[in-house]
Image (spheres, rainbow, N blue to C red):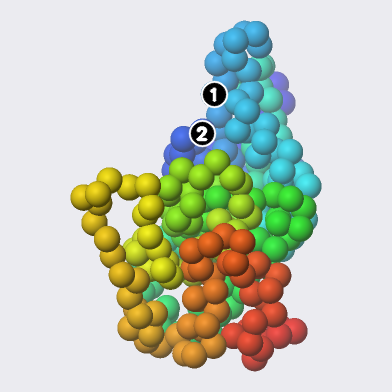
Amino acid sequence: MDQPRYQHCRWIGAGAFGKVYRAIDTKINCVVALKLTELEGDGNDGGVPAVSLREMSVLKEMHHENIIKLLDVVLQDGKRLTLVFEFMDGDLLEFMKAHPDRFSDSNLIKKLLGQILSAVDHCHSRRVFHRDLKPANLLVNQKNYTLKCTTHAYSAPEVLLGSTEHYVAADMCILGTPEQDSFIGITFLDCPSNFPEHQPPELRVVVPTLGSTGIDLLSKMLCLVPERRITAAAALRHEYFRDIAGQ
């Protein structure tokens, strides 16, 4: 019997739509990540989940150095779907918790943010938006600090308030803090009368080391009105990134 191409090494984690394993691609002898989804039904009332179909179709169209690569798709006996991805060391949340001291380095923060914005701009230019950008959904190579966006929090205010409009601007709230009152000028017009009101803090107090150009970019990314929020393309041209342009 032929040996399977992908040999499981160890379990990495599990999400809402499958388990993830570190594995070896025996054909080319390299490490990959496998996302395994158990399928239900007989093809009439089950089959491949819509979220998996969407993930596959989107990633097949994405070709960017900061977006995770889907390398292969394997369907086993109609019962298990395996998505094969390039392997990364871990997610940004784990990295931030393990190495908090490194995030005092403004150049590292700028490098990581630039990579995120570049990936987001690539998606938006192809009419794809994420709506769930957060450190746990950003994979990182710790050797050279390369980030990769996955296909799914820090939520924009219009998402939190139940907007049915799909704004690509929702992806721009990615530099802020998890405090939802950090949005500039936020008000809750349709909330109960006893709902707590918060005044947005001074950004210079929240992130005192960011500098004037960083504060300016942050304020534009956290603008309450989606139509006025800075785009990823415009953010990449912001003066904040001037000293790393072309790198």
Figure check: 115 above or below 197: below
- Residue density around tag 1, few if under 14, some if 14–19, many if 20 or more, within 10 Å: some
Secondary element type, mark 1? strand
Q: Residue at x 70, y 55 (%)?
A: 123
Going from N to C along the chain, the mark reached first, 2 or 1, is: 2
Image location of residue 50, percent across then percent down: 63, 28
Whether residue 236 appears in this view of the structure is yes
Q: Residue 174 versus residue 55: which sits nearer the camera?
A: 174
Image location of residue 39, percent across then percent down: 57, 20
Tally the numbered discs: 2
Q: Label 2, label 1: how many angstroms apart (C-alpha)?
A: 7 Å
Q: Residue 202 versus residue 185: which sits nearer the camera?
A: 185
Q: Is residue 24 left or right of residue 174?
A: right
Secondary element type, mark 2? strand
Q: Is residue 71 left or right of residue 106?
A: right
Image location of residue 229, percent across then percent down: 58, 67
Q: Residue at x 38, y 52 (%)?
A: 189
Figure check: 67 above or below 106: above
For disc 2, the marked residue is: 18
- Residue density around tag 2, few if under 14, some if 14–19, many if 20 or more, within 10 Å: some
Q: Mark number for residue 102?
A: none
Q: Residue at x 40, y 88 (%)?
A: 209
Q: Mark number for residue 38?
A: 1
Answer yes or no: do the residues labelled 2 and 1 have beta carbons within 8 Å? yes
Whether residue 142 appears in this view of the structure is no
Q: Is residue 126 left or right of residue 175?
A: right
Q: Is residue 105 left or right of residue 243?
A: left
Which residue type does callout 2 highlight?
Answer: Gly
Which residue type does callout 1 highlight?
Answer: Glu
Q: Residue at x 46, y 39 (%)?
A: 15
- Occupied quadrant, residue 57: top right
